[in-house]
Amino acid sequence: MTQQHRLMSWLLASVLAGAGLGCGDDAADSTTDGESATRRKVAEALTAGLDFENGVERVGRLPAVTAEDLELSADDAPIDLTPGSGSILQFDIDNPDDSDEVVATLLQFEDDEENHIEVDVDEGEGPSISLDFDVASNVCKGVCAQRYSLRMQQALKRRKGGIGKHFTRSISLDCRKDGDAKLCESTSDASAGDGDGDGDGDGDGDGDGDASASVGDGDGDGDAPASNSSLASEFGGALGAVNSQLCSCLGATITNGGCKGGWLTGAEISCMVKAFEDGPTDQAFTEPVNCMTGRLNALAATVASFCDPSMVTDMALCPGTVLPDEIVACAPSVLTPSAATDAMP
């Protein structure tokens, strides 16, 4: 099968099956004990830390399906969560039994084996439901300062107790600001935390070597820096998230932000972030990189479904755009797109 055919097959599978986060059963086998413990800690923190107006934490796993005709549907896009912020859970109800209405929805993070969440639902509002909730400010406490991709199972519950089909949702939790950078050292070596943007530790990921993503521009007027610092930080986080997911999927040990047989090395990520930060702030320079950042954030949730480093560049680059030469020079053999890029939407 050609790379282009494989790429299109992945796209079709993603549309039909939704954006899977993590690496499935095989990847779970290759995850280290430390990584599993961290994911479990994050999942349990989210179970306790998502505050719905009419929500309650229940003991035990999501109940088994007892009403095969009861289903829910939702957008495939990951639900982005940030500590201390609000979000919305949206979904559509398909309940063919008018005599037994839906009264609640059930949520369980796959890495939390102990508890799930039950939230009251008023089906009378219509088949399309939107539930506001807040994310506790401490959900990233005690974990590495990085972005986490998780899967969440959701189901509907009828008044008479019937449980509908389980539906998988994609969740992205951004702990880059609220997590503990020192805890990231367990997945990297002693050079972690140098601010090089490879996602390996104490640095702010913006490639400037300091611990703050916001520094003055030195002109004494107190305004924000006229640089790409903030954008570079987001770029580095997105690169690191994809690299981390891919390395985990391959069952490889992460060292300096990269792994053997992976997509990018930590040094290459560091170089790319630094090149972006030091580059011009005009749209011609920043737009292709910002577009790539957005696609990388989405790709972090799906890369495990094909687990092929050779395809990542084609998936990450936006059609019709060309990365600045300064960034391509950091990893020319990796950042050169193939003909398959033309197949991307």
Image (spheres, grey):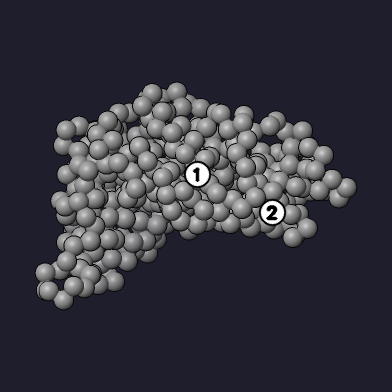
* Quarter of image, res 256: top left
Q: Which mark is residue 123?
A: none
Residue at image point 23% right, 61% down = 214
Residue 297 on image: x %, y %: 40, 51
Q: Nearer the viewer, residue 327 or 183?
A: 183
Q: Residue at x 63, y 46 (%)?
A: 55
Count the labels in the image: 2
Q: What kind of element bears circle 2?
A: strand
Is residue 304 shown to the viewer in this render? no
Density class for disc 2 (Cα within 10 Å; few <14, some 14-19, many ≥20) is some
Mark 1–mark 2 CB contact (< 8 Å): no
Mark nearer the N terminus (1 vs 2): 1
SS class, disc 1: helix
Specify whether 320 is left or right of 221. Answer: right
Question: Can you say whether 190 is above or below 52 in the image?
Answer: above
Where is residue 144 drawn, in percent x and y? 32, 39
Q: CA distance from mark 1 to mark 2?
A: 24 Å
| Residue at 29% across, 61% down | 231
Disc 1 residue type? Answer: Gly
Q: Which residue occupies the extreme right position in the image?
A: 99
Report the mark closest to the observer, 1 or 2.
1
Q: Nearer the viewer, residue 36 or 24?
A: 36
Residue 90 versus residue 296: which sits nearer the camera? Answer: 90
Judged left or right of residue 219, residue 298 is right
Q: In the rendered view, would you say 322 is above or below 296?
A: below
Residue 92 — which label? 2
Q: Residue furthest bottom?
A: 221
Q: Position of residue 80 (x, y in %)?
A: 47, 52
Residue that carries the numbered disc 1 in the rendered image: 49
As shown in the figure, which amino acid type bears the numbered disc 2?
Answer: Asp
